[in-house]
Amino acid sequence: MKQLFRILFFSALAFCPSLNAQVVNTATLDTTGGQQIGNTSIGAYLDLYYGYNTNQPAGANIPYFVTSSRHNEFSINLAYIDIRYQSENTRVRIVPGFGTYVNANYVNEPGSLKNLIEANAGIRLSKKKKIWLDVGILGSPYTNESAISKDHLMYTRSLAPEYVPYYLSGAKLSVPLNKKLNAFLYILNGWQQIQDNNNGNSVGTQLEYRPNEKHLFNWDTYVGDERSIYNPFNRVRYFTDIYWLYNAGKKWSFTSCIYVGRQDQKTNQNVRSSHYWWQANFIASYAFTSKFFLSGRLEYFADPDQMIIKVIGPKGFEGGSAGLNLNYRITEKSLFRLEGRHFFTTENQFVNHANTLTNQMSWLIGNITIWF
């Protein structure tokens, strides 16, 4: 069964439709719209869910996830207010947020910083070109999924975005190279941290290529020294991802992401080592009508040395999932979704209701999302 899953999965990754509404980069948080009042816009977003994990985890937290991660309860994944101001040469964005996603993902941030999804200000550096410098808490470009479920073909997140930064703190330089290519440079406090917990800064890059209105290709990198009081053996972390988005505005939509990371370490005995993790996913969606569409996902994730995923079982994480999502567009700015998802791992990395380890987990979840 596992071998069949791998064959189907990598066959799906090899498929690409022929090149034939401009596709939105769903890795960003800049898609909520809002009510315009002069140079200021105000928007809001509410993501409600009920999830059921057949393993019935103790403590009600679904393992390995920070989004929509509560079992057997009605809850709020993410609610936020989006306040934006933009003039010709300056811009400001403040997004305070709340919900179980914030509780789980911002647990290491101090005080009121836990409730800031974004908070940044920018200045335009060129009158002829749209070159901007933004500083503050920024959205992350890594992988094809953000915290905003409405922008994605599936309701739940893949394993991929759960183990890269959802947010960044630092400075971002945006430079349009031509009509099809945009470049971004990031100077950061580190890997998903608002309050810096080490002495060094990190560097990130992003290239966004749009060959036409239907396709978007994105390539990101990250390099930074990740040693801290929490991870004293860590040294330089290297990471790169590539993702693709396709949306013809008709029946089919697709997205796929692959990435690989490397973490260098050095022990107190000066023993050096390098550890790798990688993942790949493929998501497809078919619209039956303007209101109903069905989505499916295949993914595989491997972190044999537990550099990113801290596992329940005795060995590193290697496994994947398959899922289906039925979507109903209630109105232009509201969605109802039902998703079923099944996970497997090569080792026993989940705990079942009998408090024994197993290599299987099933997750059923319903959602209503409303925004303006």
Image (cartoon, rainbow, N blue to C red):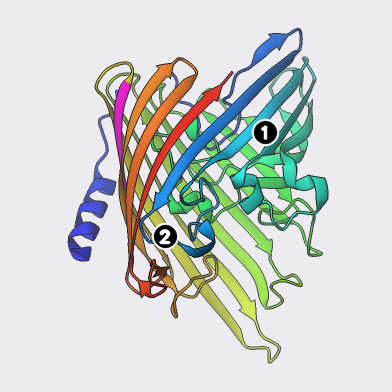
Which quadrant of the view contains residue 232? bottom right
Q: Residue at x 43, y 78 (%)?
A: 315
Image height check: is 346 above or below 7?
Answer: below
Residue 295 image position (x, y, % from top left): 31, 35
Residue 240 image position (x, y, % from top left): 52, 54
Q: Residues within 10 Å of mark 1 (few under 14, many from 20)?
A: some
Which residue type carries mark 1? Ser
Task: Looking at the image, tell me whether mark 2 or mark 1 is earlier in sequence order.
Answer: 2
Read off the magenta span. Answer: 292-298
The nearer-to-camera label among 2 and 1 is 2
Residue identified by numbered label 2: 56
Which quarter shows the N terminus?
Answer: bottom left
Alpha-carbon distance for marks 2 and 1?
45 Å
Which quarter shows the C terminus?
Answer: top right
Residue identified by numbered label 1: 174
How many numbered marks, from 0 up? 2
* CB within 8 Å, label 2 to label 1: no
Q: Residue at x 71, y 27 (%)?
A: 131
Image height check: is 66 above or below 175?
Answer: below
Q: Residue at x 30, y 19 (%)?
A: 250
Q: Residues within 10 Å of mark 2 (few under 14, many from 20)?
A: many
Residue at the extreme bottom:
269
Which element type, helix, strand or loop, lies under badge 2?
loop
Which element type, helix, strand or loop, lies under badge 1?
strand
Image height check: is 117 above or below 319?
Answer: above
Q: Nearer the viewer, residue 253 or 349?
A: 349
Which residue type carries mark 2? Gln
Residue 84 image position (x, y, % from top left): 73, 22
